[in-house]
Amino acid sequence: MKRSVMALLEASGIVKIFGKLTALNGAALTVGENEFHGLIGPNGSGKSTLMKCVAGAETPTQGSVRFAGADITALSPAERARAGMSLKFQITSVLPALSLYDNILLALQAQASLLDLVLSRTRGALHDQVMTMLQQFRLAERARDPASALSHGQQQWLEIAMALAAKPRLLLLDEPTGGMSLEERRVTGELLAPIKAHCSLVIVEHDLDFIRDICDRLTVLDQGAVLETGTVAEIQASRSVQEIYLRRA
Amino acid sequence: MAETGVAGLAPTAAGSTAPRWNVLPIVELILLALAAALPLALPDYLTVFATRVAILALFALSFDLVWGYAGIMSFGQALFFGAAGYGVALLGRDLNISAVLVLLPAGVLIGLAFALLLGGFLLLGRHPTSMIFVALGTLTGSYAADRLARGWYYLGGQNGIPSIPPMTLGSYEFEEGPVFYYFALALLVLVYLLCRFLVRSQFGLALAGLRENETRIAFFGYKTQHLKAIVFAIGGAIAGLAGSLYAIHEGFVWPNMVGVVISTQVVLYVLFGGSGTLIGAVIGTVIIEGVSFWLSDNYRDIWPIILGVLLLLVILFRPLGLISFVLSERERVGSFGVRSRKSSHEKVGHGAS
């Protein structure tokens, strides 16, 4: 796939130090518009930390993150979300006591004004969007059930639906298929495919088959730094990845 | 607490047509009817006691909004309650003001101002603050206010400020008794309805998200610290209203009103009745105050021990409070979407029911 002329996300020179541990040591990540980008590497290579630095859950010790041409390194997670970035956590973080419907509505109304929220002005207008998201993720029949009643795989889908609800320009998924059955993984791939029309994706995943099936480009991290970046075919053909990463895996 | 609008049948799950009664509106209506009839059945001295309980229930609503709905552990809610009480006492003593239309708004503003000040300091830092920081910060604020009140001669020191004049509306003077009771009850119902509207609105859904997982909703774009500061300030304003009314009703204020004891008492009211349900806060207040009153009359020496054991038993074995005996978890959490309507999605339906 050709690279986009304008990168949507550019994280460069990212260093993250926790006490005496250097989790990231000059890592970089560039993602174009409507690109599905996989972030892979052995355990402890810094994938999730890089994801958190991009999303604002962690502040990099050094380096910068640019999104849609603007420097967002110092922005809070809420400000990044308002700029068009959305994250699905590694550990499922749906709101278990609320219904599926309310989980989606909560995500959809996040950027409404305080007055609109107090007066519930957008509730009616958002109804169809909520139901469309639930239908898209095959959860509409259980709209009124509490999220805690869903299986683990369905909770993962619900959280992806929540992350997509506000129509972000960039979706960050940290291990979305963790704990899923083979069938659920296949369906997850099907559910993600259509979003490419309007959204870029960065995905951290251990399932290399899943990554290969849906991603355009891959970045391989090792010991907190980028080992290789390129198309799926280039990464598959890379001797350094084969020798260093795949052998270790 | 769930907004249901009216008592009635509600679908229990998506696609389900099995009806189930919503209990909450029925409980609310029964309590309102009982409260309205109370002065007709009680002697005057008990009506005075019931007035005090109604005002304390108003105070409990303020804490429930902050803790039960937004998850902010305010261990110093009495600061706003007592500060407003002292405020109206000073207005009465130094400026000879007794007009209800001045005193009660002043109480609301004092509670609001103190909550904005303390909430701004505790909640609006660069990073979200931990629950323990807020709990200790509010507790310290309340303790400091208590010490200040005890030591400041202008505030009457240990003795507080006595002889607050009765509040007036035109030439009418509100004395203790049925009229004051109905006035306090009307304010309680009004604030209850306003809180009910708020917690069942989309703002209430944001509060539910805040309570359940603050970090998660920040990644949706919610300014969580602002949300917390706003609801903390609203809670302070309601506590201010309750505090000013309490001071006027009792006729004096004293340092305990801003201190840790009252701050803890309101936590118990809400935990006992059921936090996260407005009606639970009211029920908790009524039962704790009622049982205390009865026990202190009949078991003068050991009543605090009996009350303590009772509170402990409920909190240990019924952590969701007494209201959980009649209210399902589903109804307690409630739902926030539009009512079911005729659309292509009707068959799966959703609504605040």
Image: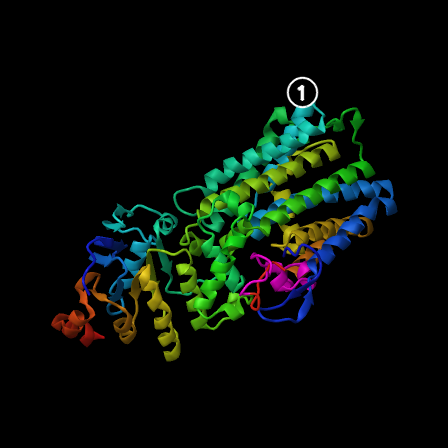
Front residue of B136 and A123: A123
**Please, what is the dominant secondary structure of the magenta stretch?**
loop
Residue A166: x percent and y percent? 41, 55
Residue B210: x percent and y percent? 49, 52
- Please state if B198 lies on the left or on the right of B137 as rendered: right
- Residue B330 among those drawn in magenta: yes
Q: Quadrant of residue B102?
A: top right
Please tell me whether residue A247 is drawn above or below residue B95 in the rendered image. below
Q: Residue furthest top?
A: B95
Indicate the amino acid at tag 1. Answer: Leu
Instruction: Look at the image and give the residue range highlighted in magenta.
Output: B316-345
- Please state if B275 lies on the left or on the right of B132 as rendered: right
Residue appearing at x 44%, y 54% in the figure: B217
- Residue A203 among those drawn in magenta: no
Front residue of B277 and B302: B277
Residue B165: x percent and y percent? 75, 26
Q: Which residue is mark 1?
A: B95
Q: Quadrant of residue A91?
A: bottom left
Q: Is residue B25 visible?
A: yes
- Determine whether the residue tagged by mark 1 lies in a helix, strand or loop: helix
**Pointer 1 indicates a residue of which chain?**
B
Front residue of A203 and A111: A111
Q: Quadrant of the N terminus of chain A?
A: bottom left
Residue B19: x percent and y percent? 68, 69
- Please state if B277 lies on the left or on the right of A114 as rendered: right
Q: Residue furthest left?
A: A239
